[in-house]
Amino acid sequence: MDMQHMHTMYETGRLIDAVAIPSREDHGWHLDCHDLWGHTLHLTTTQGRPCNFHTLDAASAAAQRIGFNEMRIAE
């Protein structure tokens, strides 16, 4: 799900958290969000490709653009 749709879901109260997940493919991070029903939503580009971040700071900035003040980190 792209940034605009994630932000809309956050604004309507449908997202509960954001989690930075280590990416095994490029040694970076990707961002997942969870909705009220327990579904995991992967942040993607508008073309549907996974968003990969080189640093936790970049993943955190993306979570903040969605609307979250905090982000969990999965190890």
Image (tube, rainbow, N blue to C red):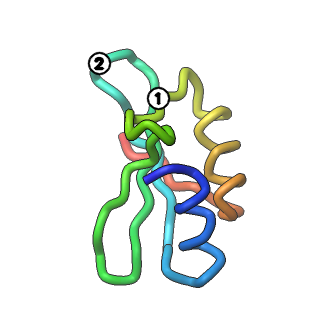
Image position of 17 with respect to 23: above or below: below
Residue 23 figure quarter:
top left
Q: In which quarter of the image is the C terminus?
A: top left
Q: Give the residue type that dot 1 points to.
A: Asn
Residue 10 figure quarter:
bottom right
Gap between marks 2 and 1 measured at Cα: 10 Å
Q: Residue at x 61, y 56 (%)?
A: 4
Q: Which residue is drawn at 45% across and 31% down?
A: 29
Q: Residues at badges 2 and 1 in contact (C-beta under 8 Å)? A: yes
Residue position for label 2: 25
Q: Which residue is drawn at 59% across and 25% down?
A: 55
Measured as percent of width and height from the top left, residue 74 is found at 39, 46
Q: Which mark is residue 38?
A: none
Residue position for label 1: 52
Image position of 54 with respect to 16: above or below: above
Q: What element carries label 1?
A: loop
